[in-house]
Amino acid sequence: MSGIAPARLAEERKAWRKEHPFTPWEGGNYKLRMLFKDEYPSIPPKCKFEPPLFHPNVYPSGTVCLSLLDEEKDWRPAITIKQILLGIQDLLNEPNVKDPAQAEAYTIYWSR
């Protein structure tokens, strides 16, 4: 990785502080891989749960379906890692039913 990406990542890592509101996901340990290409922050990182989560907005591959991570939709270079992680946290708590990534999880979510 070259350019401004490493410096920005180091700066954001220092700024990150854990915030854990009371949610059904609290206390769990969920591995999220964030892949940053050299073009970051011009393009968003790819975010993938390993192993994949059973969730309406997580593809069976584990990739997170979030407009914030889509350069064709809501991605902006000013978005920080903290904002990405908080966006994913919000998505886990409140699925986006308008953009499902996993049909079975979506069906179960709506049938409750």
Image (cartoon, grey):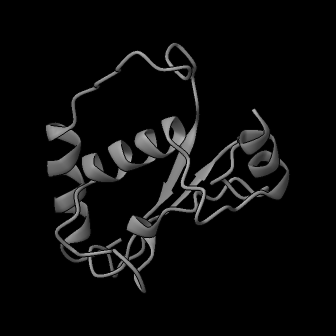
- Quarter of the view holding residue 5: bottom left
Instruction: Name the one closer to the observer, 92 or 44.
Output: 92
Instruction: Work out whether residue 54 can be spotted.
Output: no
Residue 54 position in % (x across, y down)? 75, 41
In the image, residue 103 sits, relative to residue 107, either above or below, namely: below
Q: Residue at x 49, y 17 (%)?
A: 26
Q: Residue furthest right?
A: 104
Q: Is residue 14 above or below residue 57?
A: above
On screen, 44 above or below 107? below
| Residue 58 in the figure: left or right of residue 78 | right
Of 27 and 39, nearer the camera is 27
- The answer to which image quadrant residue 37 occupies is bottom left
Horizontal placement of 8 versus 97: left or right? left
Q: 44 left or right of 28?
A: left
Q: Is residue 67 above or below residue 90?
A: below
Residue at 27% from the left image edge and 51% from the top image edge: 83
Would you say residue 63 is visible in this rendering? yes
Foreground residue, 111 or 51? 111
Picture coordinates of residue 107, whole percent (x, y): 81, 49
Tell me where residue 78 appears, x and y as whole percent: 16, 69
- Residue furthest toward the bottom? 72
At 33% from the left and 74% from the top, the residue drawn is 75
Residue 67, percent from left and from top: 44, 69
In which quadrant will I find the C terminus? Answer: top right
The count of marks equals: 0
As rendered, which of 91 and 49 lies closer to the eye?
Answer: 91
Q: Within the image, what quadrant is residue 3 found in?
A: bottom left
In the rendered image, which quarter contains the N terminus? bottom left
